[in-house]
Image: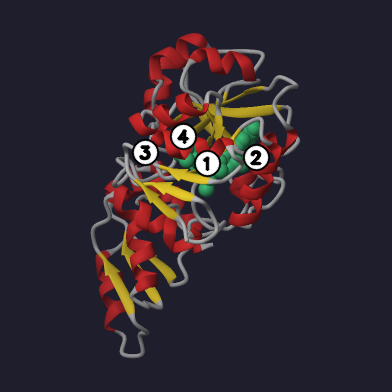
Amino acid sequence: MTQILGSHEIQKAAALLKAGELVAFPTETVYGLAAPIFSSESIKKIFQVKGRPQDNPLIAHVESIDQVETLVTEIPYALLEALWPGPLTVILPKKSCVPNSASAGLPTIGVRMPAHPLSLELIRAVGEPLVAPSANTSGRPSSTTAAEVLEDLDGKIAAVIDGGKCTYGLESTILALFPSPIILRPGAIPREALETFLGQKISKADPKCEKPLAPGMKYRHYAPRAQIFLFDQREEMVDFLNRKERKRCLEIFSLPSDQLYSLLRSADRQGYEEIAIFCDLSVHNDLALIDRLLKATQ
Ligand code: TXA
Ligand code: MG
């Protein structure tokens, strides 16, 4: 059985991590599954319990710029000072001390300083950066509550810190800076905020590109068991729902981005075979949300 820890039990969570156990923890985006970055054995366990492909690197979560300096050789100080802590992951050239198990053999590592006070407290208590993928079985929707973490990982990890529901409910934006800025994964920080800061347009990685720059983006993702159908026209969706032979179908006419993963998971819990989603303009304008929806339907 996986222990559920309260927000006052961070020291206990840190002790478990230092003893080589895995602990899930809340961030402002989604729950993460932590291991200390210099513990290759724990990192191996992360890949096992998630069923994560070996070539998919992990993000290092830090609590200070000093910690970034221990991991990478080039640091965009002004960018980090302006946008951290927050849901922005930056890909930077890694130092040789960063284990290959964390970076999946790449010469770079993604770093992010989460804004959630419990994330920062946990990293401080462990005393080194924590690598953390989203706390879900690979391919399933990410987890935005402790209960959702347990749906996938109960009995497979030592503990989960219950910090309530994540504010954003979608993962961080991943930005690579070299040779020129490019968004590898749209996320909780909108592209416009990054463009305003950098004073230049930023392109988005082509999802059909043969060798995706974020290895994780090539895998099926964020997917519930139910089949998803997306509609741009309300009338088309109503026609679809009215067809007599429909299987059990969850109807979603309004989709706030922080609810996406919870809705997909609850559809599975309730045994829906299909999910029909109306994508109005607000959905289309939310690059992170539309990216997750398209990946979930692939
Ligand atoms: O919001 C988030 O970023 C959450 C929370 C827990 O912080 N974490 C998260 O991690 O979404 P994960 O492992 O589920 O997704 C990490 C993504 C993957 O697509 C991976 O391929 C990409 O980041 N990535 C990690 N390191 C990279 C690198 N060095 N170069 C390119 N892509 C990288
Ligand atoms: Mg993930």
* Residue underneath mark 2: 57
Q: Is residue 208 above or below residue 154?
A: above
Q: CA distance from mark 2 to mark 1?
A: 23 Å
Name the mark nearer the viewer: 1 or 4: 1
Q: Residue drawn 45% across and 66% down?
A: 224
Name the mark nearer the viewer: 2 or 3: 3
* Residue underneath mark 1: 16
Q: Is residue 226 above or below residue 65?
A: below
Q: Residue drawn 39% across and 41% down?
A: 26
Q: Residue drawn 57% across and 45% down?
A: 21
Given contact means CB atoms under 8 Å apart, are the residues at marks 2 and 4 in contact? no
Sequence order check, earlier mark of 4 and 3: 3
Residue 143 screen position, x and y as percent: 41, 52
The quarter of the picture showing ligand 1: top right
Q: CA distance from mark 1 to mark 4?
A: 29 Å
Q: Could you classify mark 4 by the number of other residues whose Cα lies within 10 Å: few (under 14), some (14-19), or many (20 or more)?
A: many
Q: Which mark is residue 173?
A: 4
Given contact means CB atoms under 8 Å apart, are the residues at marks 1 and 4 in contact? no
Residue 290 screen position, x and y as percent: 41, 50
Ligand 1 lies under 8 Å from the Cβ of mark 2: yes
